[in-house]
């Protein structure tokens, strides 16, 4: 049963990883607006990240 | 005509405006957030997030739908801010630019911090409870005492960030309240946290046990849940608007023959301005060229526009109706008549201290009793068994930590706030309900609250019209945008098709003339018709006709009509009471002292005297400052006053009153600073809302009682010196969860009595309402 002394710290390590994922998501502002992302999910195209010197051409509609 | 779209926003490129408007700026990237009231559907999100395809130099744009904002990143070397604003306008999303946009922006880090605190506390609570279960279930029998020691240290490690970070705000609040010589609810909470932590650290360090870390983390986690629940805000509803939100960011200045758009901040006294239809007078000014027709309903509540002649003095806040006018500013924006209202004392008072009075009143007594019991237990045990004195003292503090007590008000009132939100009554924060339940007097503003603008009956006085005549008048009114003409047109529209009108002419402040089917028709004011030789019946008593079925003659604005130069009769546009106003007044007068304030003239005094009954204060011709003063007088007599009003003219009174309720036709429409924003449809049900507020407060008190029972049980165990971590681990979550369930359940059940009229969710309701035109800056 003394394997529990190994398993408990191991479980903590995993849990802390998820905690950091949560901290990251809060800090990146994902909790500020919880409505728009659900709408954005339904849009097809990806939007660019930074001002792009050559914006991609408007895709042809199928 | 309006200057070309691009020119209209040139003032945005002025360094001082630009600097304060943008969120972030460096050499190659600028980010700006525009409020776009026109956002209303998913296609708007798509279009606005694909702006980069329309103009090179624009980068990522991100829409925040509930706030109706778009954050746009762009390359300042290739695109100018004004070009982006012009592009948005050409797409139909005209940015709303108010003077308040220039104020310092808050990115709302408080909620972020709360989420982090909650996440960390939840993480620690889950793990600590899980580890502690091994000893509660006696699993350490298999492994030996080493496990207990190991888990003790592990839980100590988990509790450190909870005590150090998650609970930090409670210490700060407790400290602030102690310095003010008050005992708010955070004082016993802080005491409890300190006692649990100290006791647990001592137990672990000395090898006596594994401590109460699981209960500690759970306590903080539940408290933070309550805090998050009560922080519900209605996005896009601003409760703290001042005059800056009503004023445009730019005005058209005229210098010689050149018209240019400048930022309002650059406006100096003596500047010449051009105002077009629907634009707001930004500062007190003198009219240069007119005639002007100024709608002061924002400022005075007077529903009819006022005619002004060149040379007249114009107060800021009026809105020009009709053609373009030119004026010369006399005072700076910040010193105008309207803005002087905001220099009143009422706008400086700090209302934060009023928050959560219910809980804090209770906690005053509670804290004193708990400390007395803790000292009593310590004193008793120091005689009987000195070893037990200190443990008993800390045990009482641990058990009495008022978690359940602190949760009662946030959850009960927070639920009530959500229930009311579904009924389109939006509270600034849940604690407004506490104040709302204690009102003695209710003061109504007349226009827009008891009467509905533009909803009154339109009555014809004079010999009955033939069908053809009515059709001619209808055709005439279709050509004017004057509010009275529009209302007459709407009232008789269903019955007729318009006929062509020839030689139509509208004289501002006088009336309209034209010929329909060969008939010369004049509609307008009595003075105008009389100047053309038509004798009008000025007084309604002159009509010896049973015009109104109820017997009382209609009261309101009068439009005189002449046909082919002969007097024909007049239209009377009554300002009508909202439905059920009489029933509402009757319900309220049983419990509250009522009063009516109006910026309008006295012509409707008798009507309201009949409605309110004798003995009520009915004040007419009230300026915004008079209204504020009236509320103050009532408060000086020891009354707790609720003000029900709309418009800027009530802003002072709304702020001064203990509870200010702003009535709006559309939820997204402009409303002055207030504690409650309510849809006009809910005004007749105000009595129900007030009853619900009282019931919610009773629910909170009942929840206090339940949590006190738990405390009595816990404290009696603790004072007898028998508290163990497992008792604490059961009692604490049990009391919290049952109090929260009671508070939410009862409030929601009471809320069901407020009959649900529409079954939409609050969110979809808000968005559908907000898509209504935003009646504000032109």
Image (cartoon, rainbow, N blue to C red):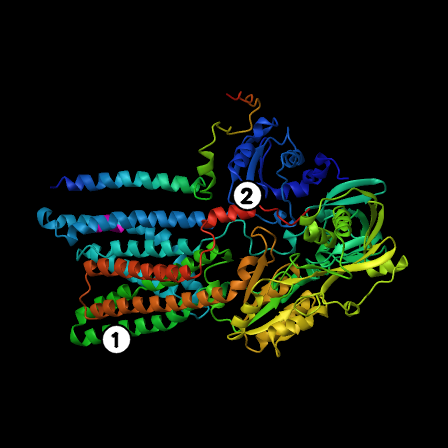
Depth check: give the residue in front, B4 or A27: B4
- Can the viewer see residue B270? no
A61 sits to left or right of B713 = right
Residue at horizontal 44 percent and vertical 59 percent from the top:
B755
Instruction: Report the number of numbered marks.
Output: 2
- Can the viewer see residue B123? yes
Name the main secondary structure of what is drawn in magenta. helix
Q: Look at mark 1 in the image and give the residue it sits on.
A: B376
Depth check: give the residue in front, B595 or B461: B461
**Are the residues flagged by discs 1 and 2 in contact, CB closer than 8 Å?**
no
Label 2 sits on a secondary structure element that is loop
B284 sits to left or right of B53 = right
Measured as percent of width and height from the top left, residue B87 is found at: 64, 33
Dot 2: chain letter: B
Confirm whether circles 1 and 2 share one chain: yes
- Tell which circle, 1 or 2, labels the residue nearer the N-terminal end: 2
Dot 1: chain letter: B
Magenta-colored stretch includes residue B688? no
Measured as percent of width and height from the top left, residue B443 is found at: 59, 69
The answer to which image quadrant residue B663 occupies is: bottom right
- From which residue to which does the magenta span run? B152-156
The answer to which image quadrant residue B196 occupies is: bottom left
Q: Look at mark 2 in the image and give the residue it sits on.
A: B68
Give neighbour class at mark 2: few <14, some 14-19, many 20+ (Cα, 10 Å): many
Measured as percent of width and height from the top left, residue B520 is found at: 85, 49
Depth check: give the residue in front, B589 or B411: B589
């Amino acid at each position: 049963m003394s394997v529990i002394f190994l398993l408990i710290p191991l479980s903590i390590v995993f849990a802390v990883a998820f905690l950091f994922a949560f901290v990251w998501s809060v800090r990146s502002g994902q909790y500020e607006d919880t409505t728009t992302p659900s709408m954005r999910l339904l849009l097809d195209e990806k939007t660019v990240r930074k001002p792009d010197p050559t914006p991609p051409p408007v895709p042809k509609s199928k | 005509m309006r200057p070309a779209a691009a020119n209209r926003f040139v003032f945005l490129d002025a360094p001082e405006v630009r600097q304060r408007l943008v969120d972030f700026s460096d050499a190659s990237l600028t980010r700006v957030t525009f409020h776009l009231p026109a956002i209303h559907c998913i296609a708007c999100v798509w279009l606005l997030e694909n702006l980069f395809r329309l103009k090179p130099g624009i980068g990522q744009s991100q829409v925040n739908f509930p706030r109706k904002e778009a954050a746009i990143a762009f390359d300042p070397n290739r695109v100018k801010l004004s070009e982006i604003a012009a592009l948005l306008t050409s797409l139909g999303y005209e940015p709303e630019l108010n003077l308040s946009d220039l104020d310092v922006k808050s990115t709302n880090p408080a909620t972020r911090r709360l989420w982090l605190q909650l996440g960390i506390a939840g993480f620690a609570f889950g793990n600590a409870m899980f580890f502690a279960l091994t000893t509660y279930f006696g699993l350490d029998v298999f492994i030996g005492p080493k496990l207990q020691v190991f888990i003790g240290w592990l839980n100590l490690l988990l509790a450190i960030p909870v005590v150090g970070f998650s609970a930090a705000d409670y210490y700060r609040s407790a400290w602030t309240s102690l310095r003010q010589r008050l005992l708010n609810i955070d004082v016993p909470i802080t005491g409890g946290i300190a006692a649990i932590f100290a006791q647990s650290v001592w137990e672990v360090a000395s090898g006596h046990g594994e401590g109460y870390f699981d209960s500690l983390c759970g306590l903080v986690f539940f408290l933070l849940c309550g805090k998050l629940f009560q922080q519900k805000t209605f996005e896009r509803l601003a409760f703290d608007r001042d005059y800056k939100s009503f004023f445009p960011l730019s005005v058209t200045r005229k210098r010689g023959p050149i018209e240019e758009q400048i930022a309002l901040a650059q406006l100096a006294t003596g500047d010449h301005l051009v105002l077009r239809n629907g634009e707001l007078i930004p500062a007190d000014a003198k009219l240069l060229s007119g005639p002007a027709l100024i709608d002061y309903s924002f400022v005075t509540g007077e529903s009819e526009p006022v005619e002004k002649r060149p040379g007249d003095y114009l107060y800021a806040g009026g809105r020009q109706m009709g053609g373009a006018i030119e004026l010369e500013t006399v005072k700076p924006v910040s010193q105008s008549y309207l803005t002087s209202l905001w220099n009143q004392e009422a706008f400086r008072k700090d209302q934060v201290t009023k928050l959560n009075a219910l809980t804090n009143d209770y906690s005053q007594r509670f804290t004193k009793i708990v400390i007395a019991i803790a000292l009593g237990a310590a004193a008793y045990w120091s005689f009987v068994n000195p070893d037990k004195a200190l443990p008993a003292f800390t045990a009482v503090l641990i058990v009495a930590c008022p978690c359940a007590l602190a949760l009662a008000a946030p959850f009960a009132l927070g639920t009530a706030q959500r229930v009311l939100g579904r009924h389109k009554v939006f509270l600034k924060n849940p604690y407004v309900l506490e104040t709302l339940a204690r009102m003695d007097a209710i003061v109504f503003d007349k226009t827009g609250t008891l009467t509905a603008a533009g909803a009154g009956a339109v009555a014809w006085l004079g010999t009955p019209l033939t069908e053809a005549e009515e059709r001619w008048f209808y055709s005439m009114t279709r050509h004017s945008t004057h509010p009275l003409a529009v209302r007459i047109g709407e009232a008789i529209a269903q019955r007729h098709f318009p006929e062509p009108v020839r030689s139509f002419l509208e004289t501002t402040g006088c009336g309209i003339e034209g010929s329909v089917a060969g008939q010369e028709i004049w509609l307008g004011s009595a003075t105008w018709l009389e100047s053309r030789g038509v004798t009008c019946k000025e007084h309604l008593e002159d009509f010896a006709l049973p015009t109104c079925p109820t017997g009382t003659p209609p009261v309101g604005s009068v439009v005189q009509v002449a046909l082919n130069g002969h007097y024909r009769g007049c239209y009377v546009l009554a300002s009508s009471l909202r439905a059920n106003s009489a029933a509402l007044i009757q319900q309220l007068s049983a419990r509250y002292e009522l009063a009516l304030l109006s910026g309008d003239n006295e012509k409707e005094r008798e009507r309201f005297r009949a409605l309110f009954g004798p003995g009520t204060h009915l004040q007419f011709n009230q300026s915004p400052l008079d209204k504020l003063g009236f509320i103050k007088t009532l408060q000086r007599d020891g009354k707790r006053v609720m003000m029900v009003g709309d418009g800027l003219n009530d802003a002072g009174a709304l702020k001064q009153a203990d509870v200010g309720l702003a009535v709006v036709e559309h939820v997204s429409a402009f409303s002055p600073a207030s504690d409650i924003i309510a849809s006009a449809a809910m005004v007749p049900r105000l009595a129900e809302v007030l009853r619900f507020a009282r019931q919610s407060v009773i629910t909170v008190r009942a929840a206090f009682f339940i949590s006190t029972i738990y405390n009595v049980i816990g404290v009696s165990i603790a004072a007898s010196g028998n508290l163990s971590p497992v008792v604490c681990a059961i009692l604490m979550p049990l009391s919290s969860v049952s109090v929260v369930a009671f508070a939410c359940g009862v409030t929601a059940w009471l809320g069901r009595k407020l009959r649900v009229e529409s079954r939409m969710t609050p969110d979809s309701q808000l968005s559908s309402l907000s898509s209504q035109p935003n009646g504000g800056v032109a």
